[in-house]
Amino acid sequence: MVEEIKKIIIDTDPGIDDAIAIFVALQSPEIEVIGLTTIFGNVHTTLSTRNALHLLEIAGRTDIPVAEGPHVTVTEGVKLQSSGYVHGTDGLGNQNISPPKGKPIEQTAAEFLIQQASLYPGKVTVVALGPLTNMALAIQLDPEFFKKVGQIVVLGGAFAVNGNVSPAAEANIFKDPTAADIVFTSGADVLAVGLNITHQVVLTGVFLHDPTALLAAVNPSLITYSEGVVHVQTVGITKGLTIFYNKQKRVVEVTEWSGKPAVKVAVTVDAPKVIELVMARSSILRSIHMLL
């Protein structure tokens, strides 16, 4: 029996490691990338969209639509600083790249996500490589979205390890913690791939955060996971903290944790295999040399 090709939407804030993940996806025969949606994170949303369009042009895949997300967080309306100190002010290493020829589609990212999940119920996997604002908006706009989407693979969280923007928080969750809490408690099939996993996948000193999450969607056998309830701290010194309750110890009292749907949290990864897959799809690295 031939296994069905998985339909993937990549929600992205490119980002050098996002670029690697996108190139990996486009060279993965197990999946069909049916769209990119953009969000702030490594750079602001407008630049995320520009970079996404540029990467698709490099890959010769301008047939793939790009839908732009909002410029602010889901509830607070906060416009956040980018991570220029990591990815350069343009998100792709300060290469002064020419503007892409393509344009984003007229639909918003959330509208596109809802449309595709409705067209292919249970068949669309969203790989969310940035803050979860677009996912939360889709859930708010369509109460049935969490049932229609196949799975949401989240690059985010720091489970039992320190964060990378504070001792408590990982960057994607920290930048829109309310959105993250909405997604984790929505009832959708969510798989969180956190820093506890991606810090094990290192290529010559570089953590392969985004490619690891992408490949977890492509090949679920690369990771193992535990199931439980996740809440996100939205304010204070621990803003962005992902708290995982694996239900091994039963809490009798009725609390905010009671009756909440479970999500999957990755707990182990086959790091050598992830690196092998990235390297095997070697034209990725040639593309990056072209890009950078």
Image: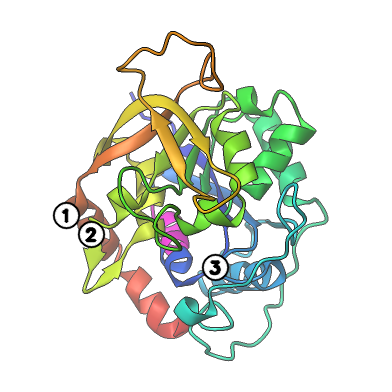
Q: Earlier in the sequence, mark 3 or mark 2?
A: 3
**Outermost residue toward the right?**
106
Identify residue for label 1.
Answer: 272
* Residue 259, percent from left and from top: 54, 13
Q: Please state the extent of the stretch shown in magenta in the rendering.
A: 21-28
Q: How is the image coloured?
A: rainbow
* Residue 38, percent from left and from top: 65, 59
Q: Nearer the viewer, residue 239 or 192?
A: 239
Residue, x 44% and y 61% (percent of image)? 166
Identify residue for label 3.
Answer: 14
Residue, x 35% and y 43% (percent of image)? 159
The quadrant of the picture occupied by the N terminus is top left
* Residue 29, percent from left and from top: 39, 48
The quadrant of the picture occupied by the C terminus is bottom left
Residue 31 against residue 22 in the figure, above or below: above
Are the residues tagged 2 and 1 within 8 Å (C-beta)?
yes
Identify residue for label 2.
Answer: 275
**Outermost residue toward the left?**
272
Q: Amino acid at mark 1?
A: Pro
Residue 175 is a magenta residue: no
Residue, x 35% and y 78% (percent of image)? 286
Q: Secondary structure at mark 1?
A: helix
Q: Separation of disc 2 and disc 1 at Cα?
A: 5 Å
Q: Secondary structure at mark 2?
A: helix
Residue 25 is a magenta residue: yes
Can I make out residue 177 in this image?
yes
135 sits to left or right of 69: left
Q: Separation of disc 3 and disc 2 at Cα?
A: 20 Å
